[in-house]
Amino acid sequence: ASDTSPPPKSPAPNTSYLAERKTKWLKMLDKLGGMSETDLQDICCRWKVSSTSSGHHSLRLNTLKSAVGLANEKEALSTKMTKKIRKGVPPDMREQVWWLCSGAAEKQRLAKERGELSYEELLQAIEDAGVDDQGLARLPVAMEVEKDLHRTFPNNKHFENETGIGSLRTLLIAYGTRNPLVGYCQSMNFLAAFLLLNMDEDRAFWVLAAIIEDILPEGYYSRHMVGSRTDQRVLLGCLQWKLPVLHKHFVNIGVAPASGDEVPLLEPLTCTWYLCIFINSLPLSSSLRVWDCFLHEGRKVLLRIGLSVLKNCQSELLKAEDLCGVYEILRNNKCVVASSQFATAAQHSMMSPDEIIDCAYDKSWIGSFPHDRIEAMREHHRRVVDEEARAMEEKRKKREEERQKREEARLLEEEKERAEEAAAAEEKGKEEVDEEEEEEPRPETPNATLRMAAMSISVDADAGSSDEVEPADLNPKFSSKRNSLLMMVNQGDFEQGPAALAAAAIASGGGGIQEEEAEEAEERLSTEHERDVLFTCMLENCKAFETEPGWMPADKVAVALGSESITEEKLKDMLETVLNAEDKKEGGFIRYEAVAIYVRDNQ
């Protein structure tokens, strides 16, 4: 057939076989429903039995014992379940089987006993944290999660709308809140999304927690991904053990190091296999079968599937002449997806999920796969990777220290330049003033006082009072603008008139002015332009007292604005009838600019 010919059609499913298989699964699940939690763990969580046993959990031995009647009911049921899972879990039972086999049910129960937050409580914590200006939760992990959300199965209808994306976002932020040491790492988005495609959100959360915290080796999703990088070395060791001819070829062409302690050049590719648990590396039907086995038998399954992929590609890989050739074969082979997302049927028409799983457990070439030997290899390589991670962290810290030193030096240099520029500008200004005084005496700017500013702002709107204010009652809040405003007045930046007089009154600190001048200024400040001068100064004063940008406790606003007419009763009336909802928030805070506007326009 030509390259353009359609792929061969898959044989029609045997409906009677599927119905019979479903009936057997229902009977098994019914038996499991009557068992104790301990027995359920032993039967369903084979990965726990293997990790706590001194020897490996032999399916062949249990099968033999069952055949001759030596196995007890629990052993026989465990053997039967493993066989059934390797043949595939019915889609409509996958949620229940994954929930039991992952140990998530026990993890949820233990979390409650230890006083850890439930999923519902984590969701409440996220809600209580509030959102920032971008609409993201005010939690450290939120920004990292957001970067990957829309890259997750973009062509899948479940994640084409905000409902699906929202569930994925919530689940990942909740897990990052539960486990801040891990937080969020790329690839976790695919694990969470894959779980959401197969179960409800609450269960998906606890299965994700079980995968990261219990089933996978520690550090799989840490900063340096120590667990995942360790498994790349273990895979290389298993390749030398189970496929020595292919391993030798990889060494000869420089793809695999002669020493197992060195970084394998295949790591960038195989790392994706393991971090995503083959989600992005196999077609959907095969990925589901891998996850069936992985959640039941644990992390050894990842090594088996990795070897199965390499075994099925072996004949072509032995023809590769360099790393690029190996990558090309693995990316375009009938077994492996060329890029992220699930592959099409055409890409994988020659290798079914059954073939991938059967190859991974084929005794004719893979033989025994003892847990103890695998863990010994993992422990050895873990020490090497840990040392590499420490060296990487030391280099990172050193680079960060050097960067901080460069930044500090840059800031000091900029500050020095600004100081020199300011000094030069000040000297130039003095020279210009001296020259002007020599040419023609400049009229003296009115020597206004803070008294006039206080009178202008605090005048009683009803009585129109302009009673004299004692110096002790003056508003010192405007002193922060004193020097800059005085310089502006001296340089003539204000037009002569009420604005200049008001600015001088705020900026100046000594002497007094004639009562007639103060009254005249007060009268002329009634125009909108001159009131804006004082309005700006009121806002500047409020900024010195604000609790957070733009907000102040309501009981301090009147004092900060310097308006004696805003009584407690008046402020209460404003809060209820004048200010809009967006100008108020819980805790008695109000947006002081809204009050300042009201003062300016109504006094």
Image: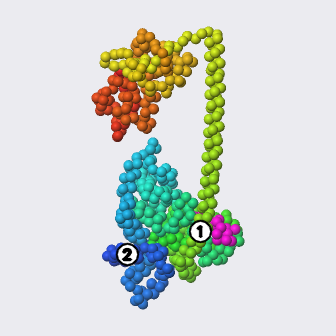
Q: Earlier in the sequence, mark 1 or mark 2?
A: 2
* Alpha carbon distance from label 1 to label 2: 34 Å
Closest to the observer: 62 or 23?
62
* Residue pictured at 43% horizontal, 30% vertical: 542
Measured as percent of width and height from the top left, residue 199 is found at 39, 63
Q: Residue, x 43% and y 73% (percent of image)?
A: 45
- In front: mark 1 or mark 2? 1
Q: Tell which of 252 and 598 is nearer to you.
A: 598
Quadrant, the N terminus: bottom right
* In the displayed structure image, the side of residue 377 where residue 547 appears, left or right: left
Give percent across and percent down for residue 125.
Answer: 39, 52
- Residue topped by disc 1: 383
Going 58% across and 62% down the picture, which residue do you hit? Answer: 338
Could one spot residue 521 in this view of the protein?
A: yes
Bounds of the magenta segment: 254-271
Q: Is residue 165 above or below residue 511?
A: below
The C terminus lies in quadrant: top left
Q: Magenta stretch mostly in which secondary structure?
A: loop
Callout 1: helix, strand or loop? helix
Residue highlighted by disc 2: 38
Q: Secondary structure at mark 2?
A: helix
Query: What's the residue type where badge 1 is placed?
Result: Arg
- As displayed, is residue 518 above or below residue 574? above
Q: Is residue 527 found left or right of 418 in the rendered image? A: left
Which disc is residue 572 wearing?
none
Residue 595 in the image: above or below residue 343: above
The answer to if 82 sits in the magenta stretch is: no
Where's residue 486, x and y in %? 53, 20
